[in-house]
Image (cartoon, rainbow, N blue to C red):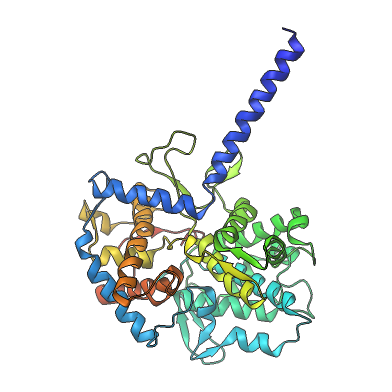
Amino acid sequence: MSTAWSGARWKNTDRAMADALEQQARSLLSAGAVRARAATMLEIGLAGGLSHFTIDLDRMDGVAEAVLAVTRKAYPTLEVPFHARWRHFVLGGVDRWARLADAASWPDRAPRARAEFDLAIVSVLLDAGAGAAWRYRDAVTGEAIGRSEGLAIASLDMFASGLFSGDPRAPFRVDADALARLPLAALTSAFQVTDSNPLLGLDGRNDLLQRLGRLMKDRAEMFGTRDTPRPGGLFDRLAAQAVRGAISAPAILSEVLNQFGPIWPSRLELAGVPLGDCWRHPAIKANDATAGLVPLHKLSQWLSYSLIEPLQRAGLTVTDIDGLTGLAEYRNGGLFVDHEVLRLRDAADADHAHAVDSLLVVEWRALTVALLDRLAELVRAKLGRTPETLPLASILEGGTWAAGRAIAFARRPDGSPPLKVISDGTVF
């Protein structure tokens, strides 16, 4: 055997192994992986095998009734829209973005869709928990708005003012250059942050937007096919992938995860592939390099839900919306803890804050995803609906998020979640 032939064989073997490892890594960048591993975590928990939680499924019916109560109050006809960022742009019955967009001049549907992608992507990346103290004073109503709604109106005002645009004549856009050099002071001012009005994870949010700007500049071939590089370039990528005018919701998530993966700071990688909102837990077994890894992709799925309506307005059909999962965040998770479906093995764990990568938080978030699937079945059964007539995205909106907030305020004056998580502004 010649040395050259032997070397080529080993190179081919190494390449094949590297390719297989990368394929394993990318398998975690999907809603299917989130759902499967969350279901595994629930099975382990039901068998008593988790370190931090026990599970009482007998209390799920009460959760379903609580979700139905808030859903009927918010949507009496039970025609429930999707859980998406667009809901938070409605204030006092006025759809702020629709009013701005309808008054603007768009040559056709694609430019508006790009603008809506720009807005949704930046607004979602800025929406990772505000903390109980922060408020945004709305210039129109004078109202002081907190939490996700406040973050939404603040980000919409930033967008409408042209803070993220590189062209002062065109405010309704987000440009890579403008994001890459976005000063922390500008974001601090725009969010009205002061010592007496603190916003959790502000540095992390600013860093995330700057990372997004640099990524889009480096990937102009991805984000700049119809314009200078901008988040709205993702609309053109998705539109090009549509088959007979249709694209699936999981395909939207796949693009979000694969294109935006490198912006997430200090996270796990496998075979050089950034895994995003993915964490370790030793209970999760697999026969490959993904063993012990739990993907959740909360912000990316929240973003994917929020991109559905711009695609629909642009004339595309979005299929398999239930292919996405519930969101592993503290309102949905708090719903199950406050209703005692999930119980801490050690009650003292409720008294101190936990890191996002702690086993307790990983368990809590994965169990939340799996329990949301079970809850959706219960809610549909009570209403005589199907996944087609009441998708998970609508149950989340109706729904679980609002019910989680309602019981949080009933249990705690400040509406804080039942478990404390140390946030860097890029997960929740």
The residue shown at (39%, 38%) is 285
Query: To which quarter of the image does residue 205 belong?
Result: bottom right
Can residue 415 be seen here? The reply is no
Q: Position of residue 130 (x, y in %)?
A: 46, 70
Q: Position of residue 361 (x, y in %)?
A: 36, 53
Query: To which quarter of the image does residue 49 belong?
Result: top left
Q: Position of residue 9 (x, y in %)?
A: 69, 19
Q: Is residue 157 above or below residue 339?
A: below
Marks counted in the figure total 0
Quadrant position of the N terminus in the picture? top right
Q: Of residues 248 and 407, which is closer to you in this image? A: 248
Q: Is residue 293 above or below residue 134?
A: above
Q: Is residue 114 above or below residue 201?
A: below
Q: Of residues 213 and 246, which is closer to you in this image? A: 246
The residue shown at (45%, 60%) is 325
The residue shown at (57%, 45%) is 26
Q: Of residues 125 and 120, which is closer to you in this image? A: 120
Query: To which quarter of the image does residue 241 belong?
Result: bottom right
Q: Viewed as shown, does residue 94 lie left or right of 361?
A: right
Q: Viewed as shown, does residue 169 lie left or right of 120?
A: right
Can residue 284 be seen here? The reply is yes
Q: Position of residue 51 (x, y in %)?
A: 27, 45
**Residue farthest along the top direction in this orientation:** 1
Q: Viewed as shown, does residue 223 lie left or right of 19?
A: right
